[in-house]
Structures are given as C-alpha cells and as structure tokens.
Amino acid sequence: MPSSSPSTNAVDYKVLIGMEIHVQLATRTKMFSSVANGAHPDHSNAPPNTLVDPVILGLPGSLPIMNKRAVEMAMMVGMALGCEIPSFTKWDRKSYFYPDLPKNYQISQYDLPLCAQGAIEIPLADGKYKKVRIRRAHLEEDAGKLLHDGGESFSQVDLNRAGVPLLEVVTEPDLSSPEEARIFGEELRRICRYLGASQGIMQLGHMRFEPNINLHISANGQTWKTSISELKNLNSFRSVERACAYEIQRQLAEWHANGAANQPIPKKVAKFTRGWDDDKNVSVVQRSKEDAEDYRYFPDPDLVPVTVSDEWRNEVRKYVVELPIQRRQRYEKQLGLTAKESMVLVEERQNAELFEAALAADGGGNGGKNGGGASPRRLTNILLGIASKTANERGALLPDLGIPAATYAKLAKLADDGTISASAASSVFEALLADPAGDPKTIAQTKGLILVRDTATTEKWVDEALAANPNAVDSYKNNPKKKQASLGFLRGAVMKASGGKADPKLVGDLLEKKLNA
Amino acid sequence: MPSLSSLTAAELAAQIASGQISSRQATQACLDAIDKLNPHLNAYNSVFHDRSLKQADTADAARKNGKTGLLNGVPIAIKDNMCSSFGRTTCSSKILQNFHAPYNATVVEKLEAAGAVILGKTNLDEFAMGSSTENSAFGPAKNPWNTSCVPGGSSGGAASACAARLGFGGLGSDTGGSIRQPASLCGIVGLKPTYGLVSRYGLVAFASSLDQIGPMTRSVEDAALFLQVIAGHDPHDSTSWPAPVPDYLTTLKSPIKPGLRIGLPKEFFDVEGSEPEVKAAVLKALDWYKSQDATLVDISLPYTQYGIAAYYIIAPAEASSNLARFDGIHYGHRTPKPQDLIDLYAASRGEGFGPEVKRRIMLGTYALSSEYDDRYYLMALKVRSLIKQDFDNAFQLCDLIAGPTSPTVAFPFGSKSDNLLAMYLCDVFTVTCNIAGIPAISLPCGLSSSNLPIGLQLLGPTFSEPLLLQTAHHYESAHNWVTRKPSVCA
C-alpha cells in the first residue's frame, strides 16, 4: 500500500504507447482465395458481396489456399521495419463468433509470426529521429463489414472485405506522446506506400489503429502504473492523436480521483478495451481483459506451414527499395535540402521518383558543378514551388502534370546558368503545363525570356532609367538613409525598361558603376 | 451371363464400353432397386432420378463417340457430406437439411469427368460423427445382411447401398474408420487412402487433419478403379499431395510381392470386447497369405492404446472449429424468432445439431480452451507423433500390417447407443491410421455364425496403395466373398 495518499497537485508522469496497426495489403487477390481483393485499386468500388466465392463465404467444404504474393508483401514490410523473417511460420485459427466472420474463426498467426523483432526511426517535429522497436508483424485475413441500415430489426453483412490480406504490426510501448503515435502511423503508411504494399487510403479503411496506453505517474517519491487501455475504432491519424490525448487526461483524472485507492505498480498491469467515439471525442470502456474471450488458438489443419528459405528471403529483399526515411536523410545530408523540403519531396514516392529522375537527367548544361544537370536546389525550388502549387490545385501528384523529368532538368538548368531569370522560369513552366512536350529553351526564346547579357544594350536601358528617375538618383547620392532603397527602385526601373530581359547581375554592376562615377 | 446386380463396377464399365449393356439400362436398374429397397434401408438421403438418367444417356452417347472415362456410365453414389451443385448437401443434419451447395467437390468433378452417373447421396452419422448411422437426423441406415443391425458408420448409407446393390459402389469419407468399419460390417471393400492423396475440397470438414475421401466398393479392383479417378493433387486443397498418381489398375494384377512380410500387432488381436469369430476369420485369411509364401511377423504398436483417447481430443477440437460456421447467419437452419444475436446463435445451433455433434463440439471447445489446451490438445498432438513413430518402427519390420477392421460384426440398433465408450471403441483398430495419415483397406474375409460379414484390414506406409490393393486383390480372387449377397437382395 502507498505510504501516503497520492498528491492531488501536479505530478510527473511518463506516457507509454504501443501501437497495433492493421494494414490491408493491395494484392490482386485475397489472402486465402483467388477472388479479387477490394484493397487493390482495381476493385475498390466493387458493389457489396461481389468479391466473394465459397472460401470467402465460409461455405461447407471450402478450403483456404495461401496467397504467396501477400506473404511476400508482408515480408517486404517486415524487412523495411528491420524485422527478422524466421525460416518457419504457420497459420492458426482464432475463434470467436461474430456475423462478419463467416467461419466464426479468423485465420491468423499466433505464436510464430512471419516477422519478428525489428525497429525503425521516425522523424519527430523538431527534426530529430526516434527509434521505435517493432515486436512483431503477422498476416491474417480481414473480416467482413456489418451495415446497420435496417434500423432495429436487422443488420446487413458485406463480405467484400472478408479475406482481405491484413498485416498487423505491433510495436513495443516506445511512443511517448499522442504526436509520436500519429507520426509512427504516418511513417508506416509511407513505408507501405513506398513498397507498393498498400495504398494507405484512410477513407477506404486501408489502415486501422489500436494504441495501447498507460502512464507511469511519479509523486511523493513513488511510481504508479495505470491500467493499460487498448483503444479501438481509430481510422485516421487525427483520431489517433486525439484519442491518445484524451486517454492520457482520462487516466490522470482517474488516478487523482482514486486517491489512496491507487495500487502502486501492480504485479500485472490490468488491461481494458475502450472504444473511441470520434463524434463525441470520448473513449468508452468495452470490456476488461479478464472477461476477454478465449480465442482457442490452434494450428489451422487446412493449411501447411510456411518455410522461408534464404533464397526466397533474398529474392524478396531485392524489392525493398530505398525507404522514405533513408531518402530524406540522404536529401538533407548530400543535397543540402532542409528537413521540411526533404519531408515534402519524399512524402509521395512518385514525386520523389520524379525528383530523382530530374536530378539524374541531362539538363543540357556544359559541365560545371552539376555537370550537364540541374542543381538540386533549383530543382527543389521549382518542384516544391510552382509545380507543387499547381499539382495541389489539381489534387494530383507531380508526375500527373505530364512534364517529363528531363524537361524539369532543362528548365532548372536554364535558371542555374542565368539564361533565364527565376521569374521567367515560372512563365516557362506555365507554358509547359499547356504543352508538356515543349522544350524550355525554345519556349523561353519564343516568349523572349532569354536574358540579355550584352553590355551595350543593358547600358542603354540603364541610361534610360537613370534619365527617367532623377529624384531617385538624387536620393541615392545625397540621402544615405535612402541609398539602398533608391538603388532597388532604379534596378526595378531598368528591369522594367528591358521588359524583364536584362540580366539582374549585370544591371546591378552597371548601375553602381554609373551612380558612383 | 451373370445378372446385372452381380457385376462389379469394373465389369459393368467393361460391358458398357463394349456395348453389351447401356448405362441407361444399368442406371434404371439401380433406380428401380433403390425405389424398392431404400424405404427399408434408408441408405440414400437423396436420389437424382431424372438427372442420373440424363447422365446415363450422356455416357451412352460418349461411348458411341469413343470418348469415355474410366467410370463411363457406371451408376454410383456419394456420401451426403460431399458438396454437389445439384441436389442438397445435408451431412444428415437438420442444420443443413435444405442446404444446396453452389459448387461441386473436387471428387464430384472428377467422378463426372470420368463419366460416372451419380445416383444420389448416401446417409451418414450427422457430420460423419458416429459408428452406426444412428446419429443421422434422418433416421439410421440399415444393414442389408440383417436390417435390425447397424450398417456401421459414419459412411453407413454408402456401405448399405453398395452391399444391397443399390448402385455400383461409391465414395465415403474416413476420419477415424468411417469408410472401413461400415465396409467391414456390410461385407464390402473400403479404402482409406493416405492423407493428402485425395482432395478434400468440397468435403464438409469434420476433422481436417484426419478426414480423407475414399472408395467403398464391391471389389478391390473397383476400389482401385475409383481411386484412379479421384486421386491426385488439387490446387484447391493445400494438404493434397503434389505427386503424379500411380497406375493402380496395372499394379493390382501383378503377382503378390515376393517375400511379402505382414505384421500382426498384438494390440489388434487381444482386445477386450473383440469377438472370437472375428479373430478366427482374420487369422484364417492370414493363413492363406502364409500359404502364398508371405511371412507373418509378430509386431507391437504400443501406442495403439492411446489412439482412441488422442483421437477423441484431436477430432472434436478440429470439429468444434470446423462446425462453428453453422450459426444460422449466412446459411443453414436459423431459429425462427431469436431474441438477440447470442440467442440466434445458441438456438439455431441448439435446434440444428444432434446430441453427438453437440457433445463433440463441447469436448473440442474444452480441449482447446487456453486453460486446458496443454493438458488435452497439445498432449494429444504429442501422442499423435508417437503413434506415427509406432508405425514407422513397425514398417521397418514388415511391408504391411494386418488385423481385424472392427472388433465385432454388425450390432443391433440401440445396443451401443447408451454406452458411448463401447461405441467409441468400434474405432479402436481404425483411428490410428487416420492419426498417422497412412492408408488402410478393409475387405470381406468371412461371415459370422449369425451370417454377418467380417472384415480384414490391411495397413501400409504412406502412399503404399499399389501394394495394399494388389495384396488385397489376390486374397479376394482366391475367395468368393464378393459374390455373396446379403439377404435383402435375395
């Protein structure tokens, strides 16, 4: 028993969150049947109960057949999460009665998961990285969906989702804030999308989250461990973060309210399942682990165990591409991008691939620092600037704009070389949107955007501007406070006189020379 | 020329192929016999009069076009726990009383591809759980040798139909003896193949790791013929064995294997409750093998004594899970006025399942529960590997093992239904094959003083069907048990 009642004052506490995340894999067919998979983009709009066959319906006499591709996809995700892929795994039946589960057991993996013991780094808001350990990741089949549109009298069952391959990733309780819980989910989504293992579309239920939360509360030199809450029904990153935040406050309040009745460090921390109500913003207790169902796991006699050879493992590993976090770190360290820039570029694999292709392309330059190619800086500015703006307006990804990577390289290179100005690059981009097959230099020429670097011509524009703005010239020479502002004004006047074609650097040089003469 | 009802399936197939008789004639004769005798024997749950005659005509047309399968035109039956896209698939249970499967079991596809005419679906103990067909929700099938006796089970309807000439054999399923024991009690041939030799796709599962479909026929040659048709890898069944199917029909007729060693396990001969007449008939059959230069070897299968115990953990455990799907939600019987979801489950299952099925579901649920699984289910799995080891050791000393199929001949209705243990002990010689996954055949080897058939069981290592069939065939050819007909056919 605690020697004193817990303080009602502010206390120190540590948040422990472990995540269980279900990811629907985007295989062509279901986990144990050859019927089409609704989590594959081709079949996401199938009408209810059309993605079914005797296996999915759980008809008597039907038998499951393992989808090897789903196992490979799960292995890829497991490898990306730094997991071991043991050489032996098997399928187990998890029994419970529910109308969305036609066999009244789910084929899952109990004691020997496909992926075990991994860790990944996740990017925190302050630019640092945090390591999160992965306990396991196993494959199972999804259940169907109940639709309660019939009022009180009946419910309907849609079995399209039944049998969709589901990867359940379980972390150690290494996450210490609602934000970290969300970030972990987002990072897992990125990984799955990079690997092509899932589209990760929340609205379609491709990912579902179950955070397990408790607190270690320190007060009066003692530590209390609160009961673990497993939060269910979380289908978005926003609700993950909100539900975790709510649960932390709820547990704190409960601890304060219980006062002396709190048990310090119970032998076994109790566990409760709570459902999150996204509309009311509260979690409601569903059941305690004591009266949890007995799932009566046993090996599924309809399926043979899976042996993973080194050869198979190595073959699958070839498809584990550079992961988002590795790519971000490379962009920051090698290309000098900011954390924010690399994050945005890497978020969508197709965008990053376009960037990579543009970097590698010949921009038509003549060597120099980047050889024939464009500078990462300029490419980043163009892709994250006007190109992203346009793509966002269209709700599209960068490659959807249709402009080839090599064209971006050429455009960036023109700006790198000073052949066109930064603002002219935007004009050329606009023209490319209308004609993605166009050549940036030709467009710049047609639109008269090639900068004039001829001293005599530029001098003429400078003289015109000086003559037209005697007041500014006067301020420059006689009013030290307005000297810089006047110079800027005059530079603008020259650019205007040139119709934007003057080379800004040459203009600056000539202006200063003449004003200081 | 022998009468139609005296022919074996192989003989009939040959006569149809040569045009001596049409499939329509044979099929009509079977349907007539069924109409006459099935009301007494209750061997068939359903009979497809029109469909089978149409199939017969198709078979006759195919013969004329020279395109015939191994069973072209032969009228046969399937046990009513194999899904067919025609008729009902009831498993002799109220819960599936009106269930129409939307697909064919692989064996049904294979039979029809071979030209077989499917007369109907035969009675069984509900969900194949039982040894007498007394657990059928539609009333028991009867033994054609003595209609006050059981035909055995669970494939009792198939055995009764075959023995009474209501078809030229058929398919049964065997989880702990359900092909061999009724074959023995009805005086026919029953083969339980190696686990994985025949696809289970479309067989309504009782215990998935033990279930196997096999032939129930008048002769060993017929068993080989049926096996030839149904064996082989099936992409729909992960547990089916991916290997080519041997030619059983050719090896059947090669001479008895020189130096054949037959093991006689003492555990199969000195069992309490065994009938002396059964033992005597089996020993006499083994004497014949000795006269054919086979060596009889005394062996021991010490873990046999734990076979029934392990079986009655493993089979109900799997059954409790396999039968969970019959819940009144998606198909099958649903209670008319459920209070709520739990009541819908409980009442639908309570009304739909018979007492033996409920008993096994409860046994299995208990055995798998997290508190007891190490004492029961996991322990039974250990016994399972010891029983396998028993056979591995034994097959170092002999090529085949022999013994009685059933400790007794057919028993009167009701005589064991109040004594479950006695009923469960009917399987004492048969369950270990299923537990070990090895094949075994039961063939007639005598008649008791009360004129009831006695079966000899031969067991072999996995995939030894060619040797088993050949060895059984030679005994059968040298004896006249095949030609003996039960009283009901007189």
Image (spheres, rainbow, N blue to C red):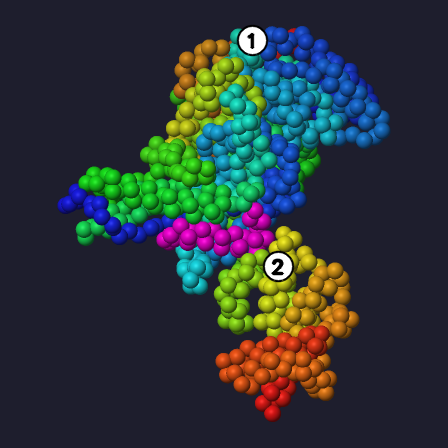
Q: Residue at x 49, y 43 (%)?
A: A235
Q: Amino acid at mark 1?
A: Thr
Q: Looking at this view, is A46 or B155 the one in front?
A: A46
Q: Is residue B398 visible?
A: no
Main secondary structure type of the part rendered in magenta: helix
Q: Is residue A196 above or below residue B180?
A: below
> How many numbered dots are placed on residues in this image?
2
Q: Give residue A323's mark.
A: none
Q: Position of residue B169 (x, y in %)?
A: 65, 21
Q: Is residue A359 above or below residue A399?
A: below
Q: Amino acid at mark 2?
A: Lys
Q: Position of residue A477 (x, y in %)?
A: 56, 86
Secondary structure, mark 1, is: loop
**Where are the magenta residues, as a range?**
A173-201
- Which residue reaches farthest left? A3
Q: Residue at x 39, y 30 (%)?
A: B367
The chain to which mark 2 is attached is A
- Of the two numbered discs 2 and 1 in the rendering, the one whose residue sits closer to the viewer: 2
Q: Which quadrant does the C terminus of chain A fall into?
A: bottom right
Q: Which quadrant does the N terminus of chain A fall into?
A: top left
Q: Is residue A218 visible?
A: yes
Packing grade of label 1 (10 A; few <14, some 14-19, many >=20) is: some
Location of residue A496 by image quarter = bottom right
The chain to which mark 1 is attached is B
Q: Looking at this view, is A403 or A267 the one in front?
A: A403
Question: Do the residues marked 2 and 1 share a common chain?
Answer: no
State how far apart marks 2 and 1 are (Cα). Answer: 87 Å
Q: Residue at x 67, y 69 (%)?
A: A425
- Which residue reaches farthest bottom? A517
Q: Give residue A389's mark.
A: 2
